[in-house]
Structures are given as structure tokens and as C-alpha cells.
Image (spheres, rainbow, N blue to C red):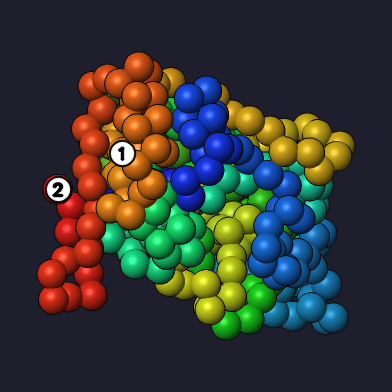
Amino acid sequence: MPGELLKFNGPTEYAIQALEKGEIFCQHYSAYNDPFEFWSNIYHGIPDAEDEPERFMAAKMAWGCEMMSPEDEDLIAYFDECQDYQPPFAEMRDGMRIACFGSEPDNLLMWSHYADGLRGFCVVFNEELIVNDDPEAYVVDVAYLDSPPTVDSFVYAISGDQDWYARIAIEETETRTKFSNQTDAKYWISVNEKSGLEARQRMREIWQHVFAVKPSEWKYEGERRLLVQTRAADTQPIRRRYPRSAVKELIVGERMPPDFQERLLALMHKYYADTPIKTAHRAEGQYTLAFT
């Protein structure tokens, strides 16, 4: 659900300790069970117009100058400038730590595969409070594709520059209209808003294809990811703390062992006294879940 991150857990000691400590376990991509994690191809650098015509055209389109010749001096100068704006996606991947979440509380397969067939529980987090204004933390929806995507850090760099240019152009136009009767101001603001929106959409798609793509077979998960950028030079996981208020709701599976449920409810009463608690149970005569 929008604004929510759902963590499905089995009835394990690890799960109850994480809830007690208020921690989310974030791992290096190599620790996950999908062997195709981060399997996308990354291109870097200025594309060659003859050897890489598709990349070259994509870069020109990101700038909005499809008709320019590769020998155009302005194009050459601009591409040289944007080369310095490319994010080091390959290095960023190694430093990234990931926590995986679901998005649908009534997902039968998630309850079966990750919550031990309704014997576990689901923690519903507030996305905003999990990110907690951390500039190194992001939430992104996973894309499910039939083949690994190709991503271009140079196109990302141009898109970022075009987004910046559009914002500056809008600010300058709005400033001018305060001191002059500029009749076409609304038109140019609209043009730059559209340009900035398109640039940000390209950047979001590239970002998603770098850090959050899985084979189509995993689509049932509806996964959302918390990405935490670190400067770690190893593959060790991190434990990310969150405020107690980040837990919006707890959903208990109806088949949870009584002794574990007793511990879990006592923990909730101690640390999350105001958090609503529901039970997920099998609906009568249907292959679906009901919540009470």
C-alpha cells in the first residue's frame, strides 16, 4: 500500500528481537536468494556516435536535441561537461544495503513463504518514518522484467542536469514576472515543468533499473525496497534503527504458536502500546484472508 512497508516474519527469535530493538536488517545484494540481483548492464561514459548509435541518440533525446550533428561544437562541449555528472552506479551498488518489504497485507504467498503459513506476523511500517529524512535512504518499488535491463549513467547525468536547468528556468521566469508584464510567462513555465518532469521520470526509471529489478517470476511479491547507501568496503549487513512510532500496525497470523504469540503481545504492550493489532485468518469458503 502507498506509504507503507510490510515486513512479513516467521515466528523466530530473530524476528522478535528485531522488533524489540527497533531494527531493520539491511543486507548486501550478494546475500539474497535471487542469483540475478543487480544483473542489469551499466554503461558509463560518453557514447560513440558510430559504435553506439542507440546510446548516442538516447543521450541527445535526454537533452532534447535529436537533430544535432555529432560534430556540433555545442553538443560536444555539453557532453564533455555532463561526463563529470555521472553517478558511479557500480561502486554505489557495492555500498548499498537493502531491506525488502511487501506491499499487500492480504498476499497469500507472502504469508506462506515469509510468515510460515500464517504462523508468523507482519509489521506494517510508516514509510516516511523509516526513511526519516535520511539523505542516504530511499524507498523504491521493484520492477519485474523478462530480461535484464540496460542502464546508462550518462543519460542519467544529462537528465539530472536538465531537471536542474528546468528548475532554474522556472525560478527565473517567476522572478521576471514580478517586475515586468511578461505575457508568455505561463507558457515557458509550463514548458520547463514538462521538461523537468520528463527528466525526473527518466532518472527514476534508471535508478529503479540499477537497484530494484527482479525476474518476472518474482512478481507475486510486489516488493518494495529500502535502500541505504553506505561507504562500506565489505559486504557486511547493517542494522538500521527506527523510531517506535514507525510501526503503524501489527498483523498476527491465526496459526501462530500460543507461546510465541504471548511473547509477541507482551513485547507490543511494552514497546508499542498504542499500535493497533489485527489477526489475519482464513476466510470461510474462500481462498482469501480476513482481518479482525
Residue at the farthest top position: 270
Q: Position of residue 139 (x, y in %)?
A: 49, 45
Q: Residue at x 38, y 47 (%)?
A: 257
Structural crowding at the residue carrying mark 2, measured as other residues with C-alpha within 10 Å and reported as few (<14), some (14–19) or many (≥20): few
Residue 205's label in the rendered image is none
x and y, in percent, of residue 193 in the image: 36, 49
Q: How many dots with numbers?
A: 2
Where 56 falls versus 265 (above or below)?
A: below
The residue at the point 66 percent across, 51 percent down is: 157
**Residue in the image at 79% along x and 39% along y:** 236
Amino acid type assigned to the residue bearing label 1 in the image: Leu
Could you say which disc has been placed on residue 250 in the image?
A: 1
- Mark sitting on residue 292: 2
Q: Residue at position x 79%, y 47% from top?
A: 94
Q: Is residue 169 above or below residue 80?
A: above
Measured as percent of width and height from the top left, residue 23 is found at 54, 29
In the image, is residue 136 above or below residue 280? Answer: above
Element at label 1: strand
Quarter of the rendering containing residue 174? top left
Q: CA distance from mark 2 to mark 1?
A: 12 Å
Badge 1: residue crowd in 10 Å (few <14, some 14–19, many ≥20): many
